Amino acid sequence: MSIRKRFDLSAYLVVGPENTKGRPVATIIKDAVVAGFTCVQIRSKVASARELIGLTRAAAQVIAEVGKADEVALLVDDRLDVILAARKEGIKVDGIHVGQADIPVDVCRHYLGETAIIGLSARTDDLFSYVKTADVSQIDYFGTGPVHETKTKPDCGLDRDGKVITRSFAELSKLAKLSPIPVVVGGGVKLVDIPPLAQTGVDGFFVVTAVSEADDPKAAAAELVKAWKDYRQHGKYCGKLSVVN
């Protein structure tokens, strides 16, 4: 069965070489996956195409090494060319995430096929009407945010006037009810945000620096996963809700 039919967005790591404090990207990914992260996206605005292919290869290898190649989805941000080149080299890449201004979704679907996962950043302007009316026949999930302004992606949530629009938990609850497809939310998300985020009904959270720049990425990832699962299953968290830096 294609991973597209059963992929899990609940704990989603976005990572690139500019976000690891000089540590190998593959090491951060391995720590996160072992800790329970369910989806990984390779994203870099500074790496070359060849570097991105290498990062994707290393990510696929460590996911396979821990026995989760059939459980953890591996995506690449924006770069259809990188995914096609990686696949030609036999690297298992499960899909792509694109923004509203990136390569069109129908083009991605054409080249990647029906088994690929395609995620799309939801439009910032008129978010709720957009989510209700958008053609979702070719996409598998919406990514949205930010919950907080973030230096990792300073253009996240920019409206037409260049103002950052952050999303309240009340808005995210409304979005979860309106969206016809799964929704994953990020943008400055830290451990303290997980309980209220889990209560909104969205399908998952995505983080970058909360894991990739943590002193102990595996421990930070495990805390985030535990908080999400605890609140989803029991409505409470049994750990300590300290801020993950």
Image (cartoon, grey):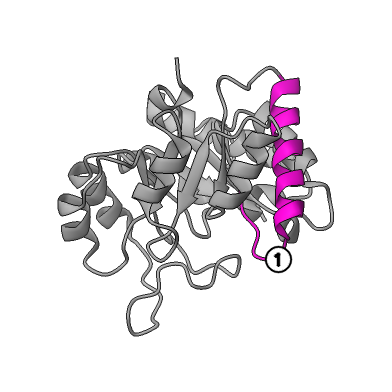
User: How far across and how far down the image is residue 97, in percent?
Assistant: 48, 49
User: How far across and how far down the image is residue 9, in percent?
Assistant: 45, 35
Q: Is residue 61 magenta?
A: yes
Badge 1 marks a residue whose secondary structure is loop
Q: Residue furthest top?
A: 1
Left or right of 31: which side holds 210? left
Question: Circle 1 is placed at which residue position?
Answer: 46
Q: Which residues are magenta?
A: 42-66
Which quadrant would residue 59 be assigned to in this image? Answer: top right
User: How far across and how far down the image is residue 196, in percent?
Assistant: 38, 46
Left or right of 135: which side holds 117? right
User: How far across and how far down the image is residue 34, in percent?
Assistant: 69, 27
Q: Is residue 159 magenta?
A: no
Residue type at mark 1 is Val
| Quarter of the image with the N terminus in it | top left
Above or below: residue 168 compared with residue 112: below
Q: Residue at x 47, y 44 (%)?
A: 205
> Considering depth in this image, is 94 or 107 the residue closer to the camera?
107
Q: Main secondary structure of the magenta part?
A: helix
Whether residue 11 is visible: yes
Whether residue 213 is visible: no
Q: Residue furthest bottom?
A: 161
Q: Residue at x 31, y 41 (%)?
A: 138
> Considering depth in this image, is 100 or 112 the residue closer to the camera?
112
Q: Residue at x 54, y 33 (%)?
A: 94
